[in-house]
Amino acid sequence: MFIRPATAADAALLADLSAVTMREAFGPPHNPAPVVDAYIQSALTPERLASELDDKRSSFFIADQDGSAVGFAKLRRHAPPRRMPLPYRGRGQAIEIQRIYLLNSQVGRGQGRLLMNYCLDWARQQGYKAVWLGVWERNERALGFYQRMGFERFGFHYFQFGPERQRDYWLVKIIDA
């Protein structure tokens, strides 16, 4: 697998990949298809992703397998949650892995670990001491993966997904050791 930084030219590719991975991860039986499709149409359009790619606080990476995009990650620089452990709560100490997704066909093949390690190495090279992310409390596959990668829970927040208020756990991994 080859991982590369995304460019502005990748907006449509990321929108397509986001739509597929969103349906795979959060569609039926977890959520009704119309709710997932509405989210995709509002939050994962090529125009919206082009804007996110242009945001200097965001960094996207695309995972490629044999010439096809099979996953991606988005890291975003902004203030961590107030419950973030000290001293990683300070400015420039931690970065969020806001999205990290693989096609279901790639899960269980070590690709997720490669993509996550790429993100962790990149964050470390940028001088961050910790990474944090949010994960839906009912996404057991992702929770298990993050636990195996050394993430620990430190709090939660709520995310409005269509008509449902869903709880996401905040997880952190210290990377300065």
Image (tube, rainbow, N blue to C red):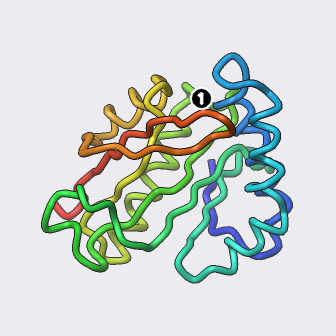
Is 57 displayed left or right of 157 in the figure? right
Q: Tell me if 50 is positioned left or right of 113 in this view.
A: right
Q: Which residue is mark 1?
A: 107
Q: Give residue 171's position: percent from left, percent from top.
A: 32, 45
Residue drawn at 40 percent across, 30 percent down: 143
How many labels sit on residues?
1
Picture coordinates of residue 47, whole percent (x, y) = 83, 68
Give the residue at x 41% y 51%: 133
Q: Residue at x 69, y 35 (%)?
A: 103
Q: Is residue 122 above or below residue 13?
A: below
Where, by quadrant of the figure, is residue 8 drawn? bottom right
Determine the secondary structure under disc 1. loop
Residue 112 placed where, x, y %? 52, 39
Q: Measuring from the top left, give residue 145's x and y in whole percent.
A: 41, 32
Residue 90 vertical position relative to residue 142 in the rendered view, above or below = below
Question: Quick check: 16 left or right of 122?
Answer: right
**Direction from residue 148 to residue 46 in the image, left or right:** right
Residues 71 and 66: in front is 71
User: Which residue occupies 27% across, 51% down?
Assistant: 173
Name, please, the residue furthest toward the front: 163
Compared to residue 54, the image places residue 95 above or below, namely above
Given residues 128 and 43, the one toward you in this image is 43
- Three-letter code for the amino acid on which mark 1 is drawn: Val
Q: For residue 176, which quarter of the picture?
A: bottom left
Q: Quadrant of residue 38?
A: top right
Quadrant where the image shows the C terminus: bottom left
